[in-house]
Image (tube, coloured by chain):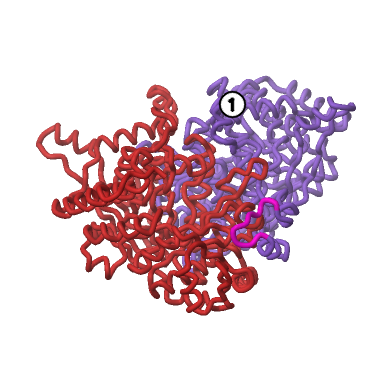
Chain colours: A purple, B red
Amino acid sequence: MTEASTRRRARGGGGAARRAERTAVKIETAKYIERNIPNFEVLNEEALEIIETNAETVLAEIGVNFVDNPAALERWREAGADVDGERVRLPRGLARELIKSAPSEFTQHARNPEKSVVIGGRNLVLAPVYGPPFVRDAQGGRRYATMDDFNKFVKLAYMSKWLHHSGGTVCEPTDIPVNKRHLDMLMAHMTLSDKPFMGSVTDPSRAQDSVEMCEILFGKEFVQNNTVMTSLTNINSPMTFDDVMMGSLEVYAANNQACIISPFIVGGAMAPVSVAGTLTQVLAEVMAGVAYSQIIRPGAPAIFGAFVSSIDMNSGAPTFGTPEASHVTYGAGQLARRLGLPFRSAGSFCGSKLPDAQAAYETANSLNMGLMSGVNFMLHSCGWLEGGLVADFEKFVMDADQLGVLHGLAKGVAYDENAQAMDAIREVGPGGHYLGCAHTQANFKEAFWKTDLLDYKPFETWEEEGARDTRTLASARVEHLLANYQQPQLDPEVNAALDAYVAEKKASMPDAFT
Amino acid sequence: MTEASTRRRARGGGGAARRAERTAVKIETAKYIERNIPNFEVLNEEALEIIETNAETVLAEIGVNFVDNPAALERWREAGADVDGERVRLPRGLARELIKSAPSEFTQHARNPEKSVVIGGRNLVLAPVYGPPFVRDAQGGRRYATMDDFNKFVKLAYMSKWLHHSGGTVCEPTDIPVNKRHLDMLMAHMTLSDKPFMGSVTDPSRAQDSVEMCEILFGKEFVQNNTVMTSLTNINSPMTFDDVMMGSLEVYAANNQACIISPFIVGGAMAPVSVAGTLTQVLAEVMAGVAYSQIIRPGAPAIFGAFVSSIDMNSGAPTFGTPEASHVTYGAGQLARRLGLPFRSAGSFCGSKLPDAQAAYETANSLNMGLMSGVNFMLHSCGWLEGGLVADFEKFVMDADQLGVLHGLAKGVAYDENAQAMDAIREVGPGGHYLGCAHTQANFKEAFWKTDLLDYKPFETWEEEGARDTRTLASARVEHLLANYQQPQLDPEVNAALDAYVAEKKASMPDAFT
């Protein structure tokens, strides 16, 4: 695995320097995952064909609504759809034909070129949690998120080896006016990290601001010719495309920036209670959305999204890490690959209120399923708590550590002569042990995934050190990382120009909190 | 899914009866899992052939040791092996030829015929943790296990819907003499539960006792003609077969009882640090062991076992839920299927000292991998803690709840007309919701896996109820289950005969604690 190492060395000589070196936090970012393992496929060819046929029926006979968006209706009419009020019906084959121009993979550039990512193909790009209005940590409990919290999460994501992407709204900075917080969020991603990031989708004008800030960061010409943002446009399932999300998509697609086009499904509420029915609706919705992006600009990058949770039929609460959510995700991955589109789904999903065993079971179920289902872009891959209402500091580093497991799994199994280890088996023989043999000495450093967090100590040592649970270990790691954070360099002129842009924008309008 | 429901009804009329009914503990046992999903395969044909060829080389050129077991050496010589001291070298093809008589699946009978299991094929049978000398719960902390603890675990396994098997040494009852505890353990499985169970392997004479007790429970003729125990015989990796384990295997195989023949691998210590090397050794070891069982009695059921953990190269501690352990297990499943043998591996493995997030991440990684790798018999599927040193009461019910997720995943995806849900999509249409539609009403009861443990309540309710974490919820569930346990019926004459057998055996020898 090649790694974009940006390890920082402590300066100064002698013992102090060596100590500093030992305790320094290494800032490494692993390359995005290139899978060397198969995808897991739950649907057979017959099931896939039935779902694809049914999705075309949904588009042709039932259709989708494009709400408060007369220009979109006009574009659809011109593209050959049957438009009736806000209802858009797509003749069989139209969406599939339009989608052909969407790329099956694309590069999203980071300002540090070593951290650019290729989204699609057999790759998996990992990004942190998105959207929680609350944060939680062991010390402070659950509270509304602030810009200070936001900055901390961006720093933690920058310092995580296994995160390839800085994400977007890692939490909602509720102390900043709604109409201005996108500016501060983008500044944080652009200046506190050098990983790729997402743009604002809460208003088309904010999508435009995102593009303009990227033009300052990357240069106008670079942005015209390259994709530098991947942003999240949700579909209001069932089958409703609102003007805010579609307005943002129109800005991004027109500028050749990537959009995740993502049904937001709580099974049994926003989609049928059955897996096949849900997949039919998801496919119809994504096809309509991606087709629309290609009407805006053929070739604009678009990702087949699927946010899927199941539901607790007693309480109506969304549930995560469940078999039904996994089935939908596995099936959606197959449908995305057949459409030739990159696939976004899964994440560190859980319903638990605390970063406890429930949270970890649910999360591990979702992360494993995400890897196996062929996800190309995994939003929410760490830090998600309480159904997405909370971004949890401890869970952020706990989940981020588990993302290393996904990297290891994706490597697959080597079987070259060294991996076959026949010399080791001969050397050790019956009744021996391998700890000191030549093959082990030559290979042990790279042989096993290493945790940065979990406890493997002998019981007695662990007890003497306070019998700490995972959350307690994670608290210490959060503190250690934030204390050792060092900002990546950015051209001061660029930084000043971004500052000026943000200041000017903020001054141009009164604060709004709704 | 057909279920052997033995639900107990509260007697009496009016409100009290209805209340009792509502709070009654339902004793249901789900049928063993019949997978309707594919297996996950990490090795390609070339890698499989290389590993198989190398395993034959190991057997032919390096060989295996049968220790302190002259009769075994004589049997091997007669079977065509090259015996040199205790070293047994198997000419290429000999093991594979001998293995042909082992069945690819077999029925293990329970005394309640509804709970008999078929081990092999696409099935997955779930059994609890095996072997810990310690137990832990939230109230009492970590302590040596006793017979009282053992009985409690057997009761909890009996009451778990998702466990198909009562297991064996669910914990070591350290308050009972070593040479007599197998008698009490078997009594517990036979009288406190009606699920299938395992026999003793700590001495050939105890294996014989296990067979004789089964003859009392099932009838002598039934035992002669049927498999009523599946027992665990470990291989001392690398490539050493000791006289205790092989002596027990000899007893079981001669009586047509099933043996799991299982290398015990901490990668990098008992096997090479590489996955392909470990698989080569595992395959060679299992082939030698299964071949030996077929020399004892052709046709005796034998299971391809693989206990696999990785290692923390800093401390030497075994590690669980890691990518390398998963790779070995996926590969071993492929090798077992190619040999035509049932496969045992995976479990609720973790290294954590507490049933916390670490434990749950590691466990969920292992459980999911176990399902996907085609395991047929999953020992340790619930209750495992601290690298197997501890059987944890809370984790037992936490893991057992997650086993329901495996049942759901294994069902696969239906795509009949009802599952396609086109009527529902038509009925609801864009902008509607599915909660009340006819399809949801008709299907919601069976649509989603339901937890018996996890918390999905609104935040405010959860906080009012004490902000309980998973372990706290699990403590309450353990207490509730044990308080509501009711012993399954057993013919009093059989029970008395078992009591007499145990009393006579115990009286026949002095206590031994080593």
Callout 1: few (<14), some (14-19), or many (20+) C-alpha neighbours within 10 Å? few
Left or right placement of residue A314 versus residue A207 in this view: left
Instruction: Give the residue drawn at x 44%, y 49%.
Output: B380
Determine the secondary structure under disc 1: loop
Position of A128 relative to A64 (above/below): above
Q: Nearer the viewer, residue A132 or B233?
A: B233
Q: Residue furthest left?
A: B13
* Residue B94 % position (x, y): 53, 78
Instruction: Give the residue drawn at x 72%, y 48%.
Output: A445
Position of A230 relative to B233 (above/below): above
Magenta span:
A428-436
Residue A190: say if magenta: no
Q: Which chain does the numbered disc 1 sit on?
A: A
* Residue B424 % position (x, y): 39, 53
* Residue B177 % position (x, y): 35, 43
Q: Is residue B256 visible?
A: yes
The residue singled out by tag 1 in the image is: A465
Q: Looking at numbered disc 1 in the image, what kind of residue is underneath it?
A: Glu
Position of A16 relative to B129 (above/below): above
Left or right placement of residue B167 versus residue A193 in this view: left
Instruction: Give the residue drawn at x 50%, y 58%.
Output: B372
Left or right placement of residue B372 versus residue A198 in this view: left
